[in-house]
């Protein structure tokens, strides 16, 4: 895997030097085998003398280089071997010749492979432990320090040290509390890191790698410590991806020493949420009203930043559906949907006026005389919301978190960077000091997401809002519960008993009111009688008049003479949709179950029996009769706002408002009762009125 990466980089013109290890281990294994097959049974019963390490190195180096030569030859790459010892670097002539030789090899596109010549090294064997300590005297003491020395000697542009873990952690990598450090800052991290056991590979451990990396970095060569087992990690580093741990002499200038990592940010959000829960209901309501006032007062600033995001998106030629989701302060393109700051302010104030959801008694039971059990509502804890394109989502989610008493971490898309930043600043400025603005954290780097998804000890729920790809990646990358939906493939089924004027209004609204929304119609199902008598033609003409591109399923394609759809499970998020002809309501239900996404589906019919069959048999989060799928929305459901729409079957389903961000706790009030084998207590299990 490493050789393949080096071949790719070599072909792209990168000058590569490889520092390797493994000669001693390879030689020891080979010599043990030879000794075994050449020994008699009696010889094997005697105490075995440890093999000479220098002999192992001499034998192993031969095999190690033969392996590299074979691997690189298969990739049509020329490799070369250079063996060095610690004493060599004390000779100025050697160092000059070393530089000249390496430069000549690099000019010839050969990859020099360095290793310490352990067979003739005059130092104490670095592969042996003496008095519980490895010998670390001299100019270099293992292959990591050799690599750092060569990087400095040869003025390398970058040094990559490969490890068996992802990089430098704040503690032993096996400890779940340890967190990956992306940028090493000497002033911050030196002396604060607890190293784990020695690496399974090589002589040193992470401690040795850090020392070598720091030496090279502070001498002018940037260093990255990364996993050698992850696919294409070397290439990813050179492509600028945030892989492993970076060492750089100027790192202290880039990141403040008070930098808050993802884990600390989540803990701070939890602590702030507990302070928020401790406030009175009126105080929590006032925070929301202050947020609404702040949004209203800063409308012009928000508009300027959002317009800059929209302009950048158009210049980058983003899809119109994304631009539509991004636009915050004006009408959506060619729709009647207005999403202005005033609408967001109104939704925040509506949330403030709702009944306080925290601490509500949901059930009250007398377990026994003088033993009262209450089931109450409480916040989930800390929410992580990852969303694309839609800055209005930030306002809705933040206001819902405030109302439900949850801490919040937000990661928006880069296309809405300016909009998200100004909205975050405005909202957090309205949070009082006795709660703390750290109640809500805004993350700006995509590279933060993998770290966040590992924080199952401090994050209680992840809610992704974005593309199918985004949602699927998150679900596959975390142990934290995920709430949301991957697709919004909504159907409208027009039955043979439908009122056609009503059907036309519903279909047009479901498709063109806001085509980019997840609750927009993506597939129109039509009873076969309507296709044979021509009743559906009027709806088709209206859709085409509104600029909707039509694609047909297998039957509609031939009957209506329209292009065939590539897939019946497709979310267009634009002015396009699929039409298919079905036999009856049962066939429509089967089609939805086979090709839908369990989001929102609708039937248009005047037959109440057919309608009830559809409503009770379609297994989707929202099922409508004679109403547009566009009603599947938190605000339109009277929830004030929504954190997203869930197609999950556990916890919340459909549009998720405040109640979907709550869980329950049990409160038991007694007077000294004990179980004592249940001998001295008489259970009554009497349900009590909530106001008793």
Image (tube, grey):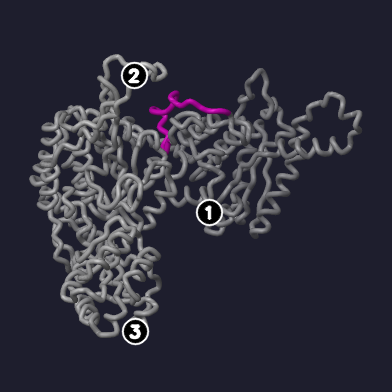
Q: Which residues are magenta?
A: 181-197
Q: Earlier in the sequence, mark 2 or mark 1?
A: 1
- The residue beneath circle 3 is 559
- The residue beneath circle 2 is 681
Q: Which mark is residue 14?
A: 1
194 within the magenta span: yes
Q: Which mark is residue 299?
A: none
Q: Nearer the viewer, mark 3 or mark 1?
A: 3
One can see residue 278 in this view? yes
At x 37% / y 84%, what residue is drawn? Answer: 558
| Quadrant hosting residue 363 | top left
Element class at badge 3? helix
Q: Is residue 109 above or below residue 221?
A: below
Element class at badge 1? loop
563 within the magenta span: no
| Relative depth, front residue between 631 and 181 | 631
What whole-number distance in Å separates the C-alpha atoms at marks 2 and 3?
74 Å
> Is residue 73 toward the left or the right of residue 198 in the image?
right
One can see residue 317 in this view? no
Q: Earlier in the sequence, mark 2 or mark 3?
A: 3
> Is residue 40 toward the left or the right of residue 471 in the image?
right
| Quadrant hosting residue 364 | top left
Q: Is residue 424 above or below residue 139?
A: below
Residue 202 lies, in percent from the top left, at 63, 35
Residue 691 lies, in percent from the top left, at 15, 31
Quadrant location, the C terminus: top left
Q: Is residue 102 above or below residue 219?
A: below
| Quadrant hosting residue 314 | bottom left
> Is residue 493 toward the left or the right of residue 144 in the image?
left
At x 17% / y 41%, what residue is drawn? Answer: 427
Q: Earlier in the sequence, mark 3 or mark 1?
A: 1
* Residues at marks 2 and 3 touching, judged by CB atoms closer than 8 Å: no
């Amino acid at each position: 895997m490493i050789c393949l990466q080096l071949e790719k980089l070599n072909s792209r013109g990168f000058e590569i030097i490889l520092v390797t290890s493994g000669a001693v281990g390879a030689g020891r294994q080979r010599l043990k085998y030879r000794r075994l097959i050449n020994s008699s049974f009696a010889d094997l019963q005697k105490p075995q003398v440890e093999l000479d390490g220098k002999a192992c190195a001499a034998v192993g180096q031969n095999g190690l280089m033969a392996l590299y030569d074979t691997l690189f030859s298969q990739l049509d790459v020329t490799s070369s071997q250079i063996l060095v010892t610690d004493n060599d670097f004390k000779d100025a002539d050697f160092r000059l010749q070393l530089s000249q030789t390496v430069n000549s090899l690099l000019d010839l596109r050969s990859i020099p492979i360095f290793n310490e010549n352990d067979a003739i090294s005059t130092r104490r064997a670095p592969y042996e432990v003496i008095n519980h300590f490895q010998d670390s005297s001299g100019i270099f003491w293992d292959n990591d320090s050799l690599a750092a020395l060569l990087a400095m000697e040869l003025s390398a542009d970058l040094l990559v040290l490969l490890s068996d873990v992802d990089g430098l952690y704040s503690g032993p990598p096996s400890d779940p509390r340890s967190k990956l450090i992306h940028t090493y800052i000497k002033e911050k991290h030196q002396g604060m890191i607890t190293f784990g056991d020695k690496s399974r590979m090589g002589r040193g451990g992470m401690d040795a790698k850090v020392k070598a990396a720091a030496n090279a970095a502070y001498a002018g060569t940037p260093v990255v410590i990364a996993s050698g087992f992850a696919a294409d990690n070397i290439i990813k580093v050179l492509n600028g991806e945030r892989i492993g741990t970076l060492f750089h002499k100027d790192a202290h200038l880039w990141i403040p020493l008070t930098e808050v990592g993802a884990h600390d940010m989540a803990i701070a959000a939890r602590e702030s949420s507990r302070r928020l829960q401790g406030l009175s209901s009126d105080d929590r309501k006032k925070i929301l009203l202050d947020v609404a006032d702040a949004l209203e007062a800063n409308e012009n600033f928000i508009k300027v930043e959002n317009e800059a995001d929209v302009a950048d998106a158009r210049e980058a030629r983003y899809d119109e559906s994304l631009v539509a989701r991004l636009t915050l302060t004006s009408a959506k393109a060619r729709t009647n949907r207005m999403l202005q700051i005033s609408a967001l302010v109104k939704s925040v104030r509506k949330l403030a006026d709702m009944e306080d959801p925290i601490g509500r008694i949901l059930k009250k039971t007398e377990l026994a005389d003088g033993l009262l059990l209450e089931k109450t509502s409480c916040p989930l804890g800390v929410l992580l919301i990852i969303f694309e394109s839609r800055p209005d989502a930030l306002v809705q989610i933040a206001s819902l978190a405030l109302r439900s008493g949850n801490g919040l971490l937000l990661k928006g898309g880069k296309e809405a960077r300016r909009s998200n930043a100004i909205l975050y600043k405005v909202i957090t400025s309205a949070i009082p000091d006795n709660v703390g603005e750290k109640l809500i954290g805004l993350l700006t780097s995509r590279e933060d997401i993998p770290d966040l998804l590992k924080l199952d000890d401090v994050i209680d729920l992840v809610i992704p809002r974005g593309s199918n790809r985004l949602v699927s990646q998150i679900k596959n990358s975390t142990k934290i519960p995920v709430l949301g939906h991957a697709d919004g493939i909504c159907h409208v089924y027009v039955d043979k008993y439908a009122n056609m004027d009503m059907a036309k209004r519903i279909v047009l609204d479901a498709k063109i009111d806001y085509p980019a929304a997840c609750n927009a119609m993506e597939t129109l199902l039509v009873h076969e009688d309507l296709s044979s008598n021509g009743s559906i033609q009027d709806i088709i003409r209206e859709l085409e008049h509104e600029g909707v591109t039509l694609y047909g399923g297998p039957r509609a394609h031939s009957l209506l003479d329209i292009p065939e759809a590539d897939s019946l499970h497709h979310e267009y998020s634009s002015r396009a949709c699929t039409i298919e002809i079905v036999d009856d309501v049962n066939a429509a239900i089967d089609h939805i179950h086979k090709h839908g996404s369990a989001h929102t589906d609708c039937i248009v019919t005047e037959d109440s029996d057919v309608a009830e069959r559809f409503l009770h048999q379609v297994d989707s989060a929202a099922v409508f009769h004679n109403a547009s799928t566009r009603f599947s929305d938190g605000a339109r459901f009277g929830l004030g706002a929504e954190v997203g729409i869930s197609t999950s079957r556990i916890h919340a389903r459909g549009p998720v408002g405040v109640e979907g961000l709550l869980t329950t706790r049990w409160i038991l009030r007694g007077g000294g009762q004990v179980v004592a084998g249940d001998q001295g207590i008489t259970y009554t299990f009497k349900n009590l009125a909530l106001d008793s």
